[in-house]
Amino acid sequence: MREDEQKPWKVTHSERGPALPLFQVRFDRVQNPRNGHTMKAVILEADDWVNVVALTPREKVVVVRQYRFGTRQMTVEIPAGIVEAGETPKEAAIRELREETGYAAREWKYLGYVEPNPAFMDNACHNWLAVDASQVDQPTLDVGEDICVGEMSLEELTQEIEAGRLRHSLALVALAQVFDDLWPDSP
């Protein structure tokens, strides 16, 4: 593949679509530089997100169990949420960990970000490692949340993944980063 031969697609027109609770729809008319074909692309504009891998002093990971509307199933995940207006990703991570779990951490390490689905989304998901996390308060859940908080060892997390109860791709990416750094010999 020769990158120097590829050209960016030209955006010839953009228009707003419907505003949804978590997304603003945008329609772009784009032109393929290879053949000149013009098509309508659908883009979901979204605020950035955060994921938090919170590690306790006993090297357990703080997890949340919650119902997910998209799959209509209960899932096991790590604390996560939206970066609100005026917040940095780190501030959002600290807030989300505290709100969803009641945990706070003494040390924070930025693990980088991923693009959730660049085919039609414009946001980033920032991954954080919270070290020395302990429960300091009760969770303060939003009206649309019903979360059960727990802690899992690396072995228990691996079992949840293998059993298909932990399938959230963005959570798996963040956990993989931590597994590779902290437990290089892990399964």
Image: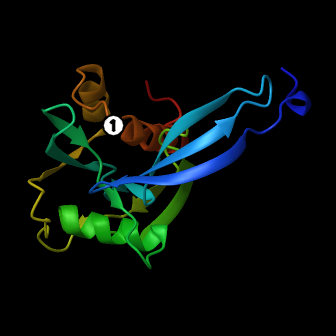
* Count of picture labels: 1
Q: Is residue 15 left or right of residue 152?
A: right
**Residue 91: quarter of image:** bottom left
Q: Visible in this render: residue 24?
A: no
Task: Report the residue at 24% width, 33% height from top.
Answer: 156
Q: Is residue 179 left or right of residue 166?
A: right
Image height check: is 142 above or below 74?
below
Q: Is residue 182 left or right of residue 20?
A: right
User: x, y percentage for residue 27?
Assistant: 50, 45
Circle 1 packing at 10 Å, graded few (<14), some (14-19), many (20+), is: some
Camera-side residue: 128 or 106?
128
Task: Report the residue at 91% width, 32% height from top.
Answer: 4
Q: Which residue is mark 1?
A: 154
Q: Visible in this render: residue 108?
A: yes
Task: Report the residue at 29% width, 64% height from top.
Answer: 97
User: x, y percentage for residue 158?
Assistant: 32, 28
Task: Report the residue at 73% width, 38% height from top.
Answer: 9
Identified by mark 1, the residue type is Leu
Camera-side residue: 121 or 112?
121
Quadrant (top left/top right/bottom left/bottom right) for the N terminus: top right
